[in-house]
Amino acid sequence: MHIRHRPSWELPESAATPESVYLSRRALLGAGAGLIGTLGLPGGAQAGFLDSLGLSGGDKAPKGPAPGDPANDPTKDLYPARHNDAFTLDRPVTPEDISANYNNFYEFGSDRSYYQVADVCAQMPRRPWTVKIDGLVEKEREVGIDDLIRAMALEERLYRHRCVEAWSMAVPWTGFPVKDFVSWARPLSSAKYMRMETFLNPDVAAGQRRFTYPWPYVDGLTMAEATNDLAFFVTGIYGKPAPNQFGAPLRLAVPWKYGFKSVKSIVRISFVEERPVGLWEQIQGREYGFWANVNPAVPHPRWSQASERDIGTGERRPTEIYNGYGEQVAGLYAGIKGENLFM
């Protein structure tokens, strides 16, 4: 008889976070919005000032069909993908209507009171979309996203997701292991890091018109992290192509790290020898470091990380070290000294 022993991180599927909670999340007010309060501008002037800084994101999405509608995705025939039973949850999946409207996507703005993030993100065209693969590789190339997706074997995984802002969700990502991509990309042995870069389109993404952020968004992983079984490139969610606000058409999911490490809407993947400096690390390195592993015992400089709010249920639960995935990833950091691994 074959007896299967579940690893400590494995959860029942009935426990995943519902999709609806994730999509409506927005972040704190941006620097420009704070400046408005400082200047004491009246209401009408505030709107114009926000627009001039690219902070408003547009109060309403333009009329007509959304160019980013996932219903028109050329790879929709690949969904739903095979479910990988090795990745389960200890909590309910977050309802789609919640997760789809609970988002941090600073390229499109920093305050959800000025617009609905899902509607604004939907105005970004999903095709054509190419991903440049360069740096320390056998052959640099640029590949269309549909060709890349079809070159990989898609699967569905249930993952916990923990934001640095101390909220969490549980979602059914569809995509492929980063290690499969690495094998396909064929980096040289001298590559020590995988650097990822997001799109740059300020005509559509109003947040990218802000002078306070060093766009495009950049972050990275060590090669050991990138080839860990848990590292996952996401193309879909809830059994279908992912809507834009989730980071379509290609994003990263590294569930043992805080969410800002999971780069959205990737257009370039470079294999490099020097450690990448992420956007948030450039802005405030004291608060957002390279490693950013989840740890309840290490507070953010401005708030505790000891617990988290589940956006699907509204309940608070204790935060787990490495977001509960320590059995799979703790060994990646053995022997690393003199660095802040947890923020």
Image (cartoon, rainbow, N blue to C red):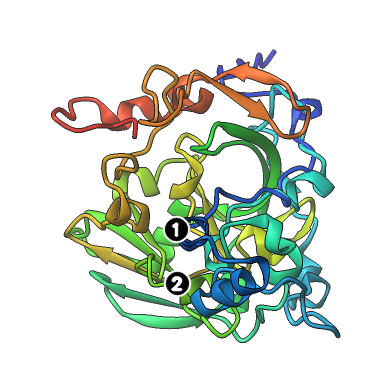
Relative to residue 281, is residue 332 depicted above or below?
A: above
Q: Which element type, helix, strand or loop, lies under badge 2?
A: loop
Left/right of residue 321 with respect to residue 50 in the rendered view: left
Taking depth in this image into account, of 175 and 30 the one nearest to the observer is: 30
- The mark lying in front, picked from 1 and 2, is 1
In x, y percent, where is residue 198? 46, 69
Q: Which mark is residue 213?
A: none
Tags 1 and 2 touching, CB below 8 Å = yes
Query: For the residues marked 1 and 2, what is the alpha-carbon distance in whole angstroms?
Result: 9 Å
Left/right of residue 101 with respect to residue 186 in the rendered view: right
In x, y percent, where is residue 79? 79, 60
Relative to residue 228, is residue 303 depicted above or below?
A: above
Q: Which element type, helix, strand or loop, lies under badge 1?
A: helix
Which residue is rendered at x = 60% and y = 77% of the image? 48
Which residue position is annotated with label 1? Answer: 31
Q: Which residue type carries mark 2?
A: Arg
Q: Which residue type carries mark 1?
A: Ala
Which residue is rendered at x = 31% and y = 75% of the image? 134
Q: Looking at the rendering, which quadrant does residue 213 occupy?
A: bottom left
Left/right of residue 231 with respect to residue 291 in the rendered view: right
Taking depth in this image into account, of 176 and 115 the one nearest to the observer is: 115
In x, y percent, where is residue 133? 38, 74
Which residue is rendered at x = 31% and y = 32% of the image? 332
Task: Determine crowd level at label 2: few under 14, some 14-19, many 20+ residues with C-alpha closer than 10 A.
Answer: many
Q: Which mark is residue 210?
A: 2
Q: Could you tell which of marks 1 and 2 lies nearer the N-terminus?
A: 1
Q: Looking at the rendering, which quadrant does residue 250 occupy?
A: bottom right
Which residue is rendered at x = 45% and y = 27% of the image? 303
